[in-house]
Amino acid sequence: MPEVIAADGSLRNDNWAVVARPEAGESLNIPEGQPALIPVDLWLAGADHYAGRDDIGVWFDSHDEPEQLASRVHEPALIAVNFPRFVDGRGYSIARLLRERYGYSGELRAIGDVLLDQLQFMKRCGFDAFALRPDKDATKAARCLNFFSQTYQAAADTDVPLFRRRAS
């Protein structure tokens, strides 16, 4: 079973299935007996059907706008953001908007082309769980999440920049 990395570097089994967007003319195929992440727009289209279910979460693709979930941000059991390629940084902005503008406080997971050297930056943007690519070693995650002992800028993980922390 794949593993998910928590923001503290610990590992746990990942029992969430990421359900791919169905092709034109096909229906959404949610696995039975397993928690599932479905595309955010499809969740919104059937939100009344999914309301109150703790086994259905949503995932954003890098081109999805987080404001579409703004009024219902606390309803999905889990929110994930897909990084289709490691050079696509739009997921960082989605995470910050979900955390800072829309007040999402649940688990925010990075999925897709997630690499070890990105973990600390993702954590600073508000991610608190990470599903690495299958070819990467998750046991190295703790070191990568805490590579820098101090950060200069304010971000989702601290709203006080270093110069103000030093002054107090």
Image (cartoon, grey):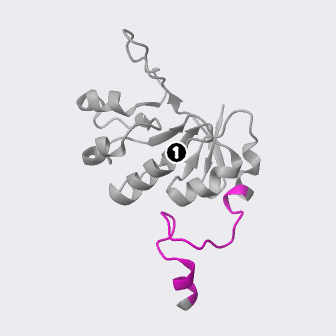
Nearer to me, 25 or 129: 25
Residue found at the very far bottom of the displayed protein: 167
Residue found at the very far top of the displayed protein: 25
Circle 1: element type: strand
**x, y percentage for residue 18?**
51, 29
The relative height of residue 132 versus residue 141 in the rendered view (above or below) is above
Q: Label 1 is placed on what type of residue?
A: Arg
Instruction: Report whether 154 appears left or right of 6.
Output: left
Magenta stretch containing residue 131, yes or no? no
Question: Do we see residue 20 in this rendering?
Answer: yes
The relative height of residue 166 versus residue 96 in the rendered view (above or below) is below
Circle 1 is placed at which residue position? Answer: 109
Question: Do we see residue 7 in this rendering?
Answer: no
**x, y percentage for residue 117?**
70, 51
Q: Dividing the picture into quarters, in which one does residue 166 lie?
A: bottom right
Magenta stretch containing residue 162, yes or no? yes
**x, y percentage for residue 44?**
29, 32
Which region of the structure is painted magenta? 144-166
